[in-house]
Image (cartoon, rainbow, N blue to C red):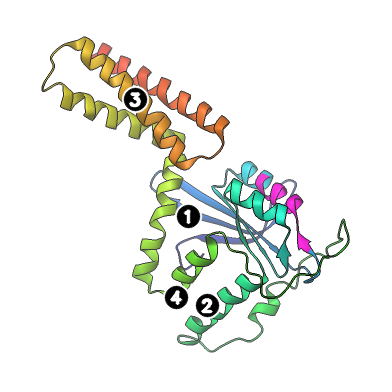
Amino acid sequence: MEESGFKVYQNFKTSRHMIDIYGVLPTVLGDMGVVVACKNYDERWEVGLDVLKEMEMVAKTLKASKVVVITTSYFTKSAINYAGRRNIKIVDKDGLLTMAKKFSGNAASMNEPRADVIDNEFEDEEDYVPASNPISRPKSRVVTSGLINRGKQSLSKKTGQKSVSSVGPMIKAILRNIIALIIIVFLLSSFAAYLISFGYKNTAVLGVSKILFSAILAYGIVILVERDATKILTKGTTVFFVTMIMHVIIIILT
């Protein structure tokens, strides 16, 4: 995360939680936050829905854009399905080892190798008390939901290539910022109306076109970055009405 430009805080404390890793990526339109939970569980115990939901609450408190959960064991099937629906990145034991080997290989070319790095990562984790009977998990199972692939690319490529791989999350973070979204929709709808004005001088046509383009852009862009229907409706409606108010103010002032 540090190599990708994040400012990283370990054992970050909030009023109610202790976060293993809290990363902040500064952008022009605001900071993109990522909360990471590192669970040092025995291989017999699986990470369940409770951990994922708790990290979602933490992310909401800190207004973080992303949740990542990494474990030395595996995830329950319900947790895997939930992570896929909620856009939570999860990394299990096999994925963690793959990332660690990849990172160690790159670090060895620049620094002396440290065999104790992986062990020290989980020394301070609290013991886990399982809520149900342990479930054995074959070692061949690998769970990834995007972070592994992104992690491999960001850790194995050169610095210039890493910056390219971080463009996607930065764009999504910008589009999730409601102020940035309002500005984008306002500018695009104004530009579209400006293009139409070359063919139509009727103010009614221009007014209707601004309303139409504002609605399409407001809801369309929100749908691209949000999965929850309630968020889509709420954020899209807010962006649409604020954009229309801005258009009205511009008309009055001119």
Q: Spot the residue most to the bottom.
A: 112
Q: Amino acid at mark 2?
A: Phe
Q: In front of the other: label 4 or label 1?
A: 4
* Residue hosting label 4: 156
* Residue hosting label 3: 214
Label 3 – label 2 distance at C-alpha: 45 Å
Q: Amino acid at mark 3?
A: Ser
- Percent position of residue 46, x then y: 77, 62
Question: If you read the primary sequence from the N terminus, does the residue marked by circle 2 or circle 1 appear first?
Answer: 1
Helix, strand, or loop for circle 4?
helix
Label 2 – label 1 distance at C-alpha: 21 Å
- Percent position of residue 184, x then y: 34, 35
- Percent position of residue 244, x then y: 36, 19
Q: Amino acid at mark 1?
A: Leu
Residue occupying the point 44% across, 75% down: 156
- Tag 4: Cα neighbours inside 10 Å, few (<14), some, or many (≥20)? some
* Residue hosting label 1: 25
Residue occupying the point 40% across, 48% down: 171
